[in-house]
Image (cartoon, rainbow, N blue to C red):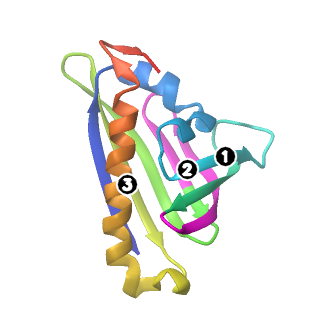
């Protein structure tokens, strides 16, 4: 399993950040590797919500099949990956001084053999960590002075 963690500070309190990140379909607006999201469940938020995300990293394009496994308002969104890439992850929001939020993104993923399997996981982790850091830079631009500006 590849363990990947990235985090950033956002210029808004968790309750405000939550109003934006809880809209799963909007994640394609700040995730550079996510091209589209379509829901496979009637629900679009909360535990049990299922969706597929067309993901592209360089020349590699795949469909990430996901299910929301944890949903705590203004705190956590947990996800299980059951497609080509498998594993679990979560976004967590923690309050910081000055009405800011620490946004932490953690994933434990396993890759199929054709993406290097266990041997390729260290390289895959580095690549994804770089992409996700860029994603969090884009996410941080969505907040200013305690408000959503996106």
* Residue visible at 35% across and 41% down in the picture: 136
- Give the mark, 1 or 3, whose residue is nearer the N terminus: 1
> Which numbered dot is residue 34?
2
Q: Secondary structure at mark 1?
A: strand
Give me the C-alpha separation between circle 2 and circle 1: 8 Å
Crowd band around label 1 with a 10 angstrom C-alpha radius: few (<14), some (14–19), many (20+): some
Which image quarter: residue 139?
top left
For the record, the magenta segment spans 58-79
Residue 17 picture location, percent across and down? 42, 25
- What residue is disc 3 on? 131
Q: Are marks 3 and 2 in contact (CB under 8 Å)?
A: no
C-alpha gap between disc 1 and disc 3: 18 Å
- What secondary structure is found at the residue carrying circle 2? strand
Mark 3: few/some/many CA within 10 Å (<14, 14-19, 20+) = some
In-front residue for pair 143/74: 143
Towards the viewer: 134 or 104: 134
Decide if residue 27 is on the left or right side of residue 9. Answer: right
| Percent position of residue 95, x then y | 28, 27
Compared with residue 116, is residue 20 higher up or lower down, i.e. above or below? above
Residue 69 included in the magenta stretch of the image: yes
Q: Quadrant of the N terminus?
A: bottom left
Q: Is residue 106 above or below residue 58?
A: above
Q: Residue furthest front?
A: 59
* Displayed quadrant of residue 26: top right
| Residue pictured at 55% horizontal, 31% vertical | 22
Residue at mark 1: 37
The answer to whether marks 2 and 1 mark residues whose Cβ atoms lie closer than 8 Å is yes
């Amino acid at each position: 399993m590849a363990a990947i963690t990235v985090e950033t500070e956002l210029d808004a309190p968790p309750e405000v950040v939550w109003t934006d990140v809880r809209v799963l379909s909007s994640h394609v607006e700040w995730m550079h590797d996510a091209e589209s999201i379509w829901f496979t469940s009637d629900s679009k938020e909360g535990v049990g919500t299922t969706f597929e995300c067309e993901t592209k990293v360089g020349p590699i394009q795949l469909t990430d099949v996901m299910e929301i496994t944890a949903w705590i308002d203004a705190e956590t969104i947990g996800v299980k990956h059951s497609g080509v890439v498998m594993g679990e992850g979560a976004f967590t929001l923690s309050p910081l001084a000055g009405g800011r939020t620490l946004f932490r993104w953690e994933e434990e993923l396993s890759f199929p053999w054709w993406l290097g399997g266990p041997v390729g996981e260290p390289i895959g982790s580095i690549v994804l960590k770089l992409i996700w850091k860029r994603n969090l830079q884009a996410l941080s631009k969505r907040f200013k002075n305690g408000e959503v500006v996106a």
